[in-house]
Amino acid sequence: MTSKRNVIKHPQIKNPVETLANTRHEFGEHGGVNMSIEASTTFTAMHPDILADMFHGDKGPDQGGCYLYGRHFNPTVYSLSRQLAALEGTEAAYCTASGMAAISATLIQLCNTGDHIVSSHTVYGGTYALMHDMMPVKNGIGTTFVDITDLDEVEGAITTNTRVLYAESISNPTLRVADIPALSDIAHRHNLKLVIDNTFSPLIISPKQLGADIVVHSMTKFIGGASDHIAGAICADKDFILELMDLHTGALMLLGPTMDPKVAYDISLRIPHLSLRMTEHGQRAQLFAERLKAMGLNICYPGLPEHPDYELLSDLHCPDYGYGGILTLDMGTEELANQLMDMLQNDYRFGYMAVSLGYFDTLMSCSGSTTSSEMTEEDKLEAGISPGLVRMSVGYTGTTEQRWRQLQSALERLDIKGPGPMRVTA
Ligand code: PLP
């Protein structure tokens, strides 16, 4: 049974853009409005003692402005990381070569052999595979997967070995919303770290403000915004970021998923307009969801009052950015789903059949056979990922009405505008 959420009224969520605007601006070496790229892999010490001090941990980027080696801290990557910390309201952050690097480094840092994780069963397929297939074998770290919306099930899965409670703020692809304040309460009562993947909802949800300990991102998605860089970030307190860089036991330092400073530079220029992009993604997704719903289609979008987590998200989100840029449309069968996507891409140029999300154009994929294919059929069924489920990351190119005409026209050609296999019956 799903336990009823105690409605806790949160102190007004602070819009992260205000914190971001107060963050130190990084000028270029010659006073350029954009920062310079520090492309060096190694850094000159002005005195022989400095290198030894750095190896002892007595000097560093925040202790004397000293840098050691590119796999440790890099000034350009550190500058982007400060932007991410401001965005997520954490004390510190550091960026990684991918979202998976951020997730795997975080989990490996938090858990030792024999430890245990409680995770939502609806997480990105790669994250699921990491916890379900890889970590038990390679690290001796087990995971129990639960329905994250069932707080009794979550608490019941915690054992004396549990170290981490893990969830996505808005789950991929089922679009269920994690009740972060309630999960934080459970995690902290059992002395666990609450780790939230906020890839689907930057700016919309601020997990740290709601009680999460560590926030991870795949910046490959909305934050990058152009589908041109694979990148990730870990936002946490300073001690945890320093732990990740420890020369003896740090998962970032020793596994080495280092972000290229040129990538960090590129992404840092996308942060200032993330708010505009998230607003537009969200407004279009909301409108399309409402219209698809009105057509009687089987649509899932957390901004629709019928969505089981509409009230929760309305309580948790920063209202300036709406309910997110992702919706799903259940076409009933994979065949119909494929026909729709084929038409939308090849006849109408509405968007592209591609995995990933957060691009300026619309991206569409059938989650069951792609980004969630790592999950067992049983787990997919349990999570509600049916074979005809099309995940749509709604882009903002073209005009809204032009895109709507294309979508409507494709659906009409498939003759599914009225009663049919996808018609909502309840
Ligand atoms: N987290 C979520 C929610 C994702 O959707 C993805 C990728 O699709 C990842 C993490 C992994 O990110 P990356 O591909 O940058 O490693």
Image: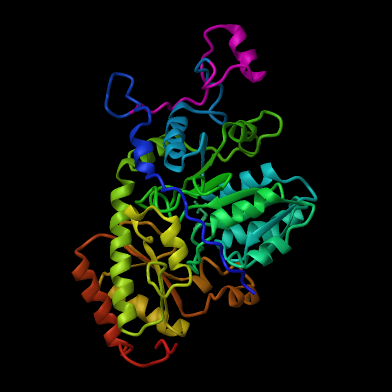
- Is 356 included in the stretch rendered in magenta? no
Question: What residue appears at the point 30 percent right and 71 percent down from the top-left corner?
Answer: 288
From the viewer's perspective, is residue 355 above or below residue 405? above
Q: Position of residue 213 (x, y in %)?
A: 58, 44
Question: What residue appears at the point 47 percent right and 80 percent down from the top-left corner?
Answer: 388
* Quarter of the rendering containing residue 155: bottom right
Which quarter of the rendered picture does the C terminus lie within? bottom left
Q: Position of residue 267 (x, y in %)?
A: 38, 41
Left or right side of 405 for 420:
right
Name the one closer to the observer, 340 or 102. Answer: 102
Question: What residue appears at the point 68 percent right and 45 percent down from the top-left corner?
Answer: 108
Q: Is residue 356 visible?
A: no
From the viewer's perspective, is residue 134 above or below residue 340? above
Q: Which residues are magenta?
A: 35-63
Name the one closer to the observer, 241 or 32. Answer: 241
Left or right side of 405 for 372:
right
Q: Position of residue 389 (x, y in %)?
A: 46, 76
Name the one closer to the observer, 309 or 392. Answer: 309
Q: Is residue 255 visible?
A: yes
* Quarter of the rendering containing residue 87: top left
- Is 55 included in the stretch rendered in magenta? yes
Question: What residue appears at the point 41 percent right and 84 percent down from the top-left corner?
Answer: 336
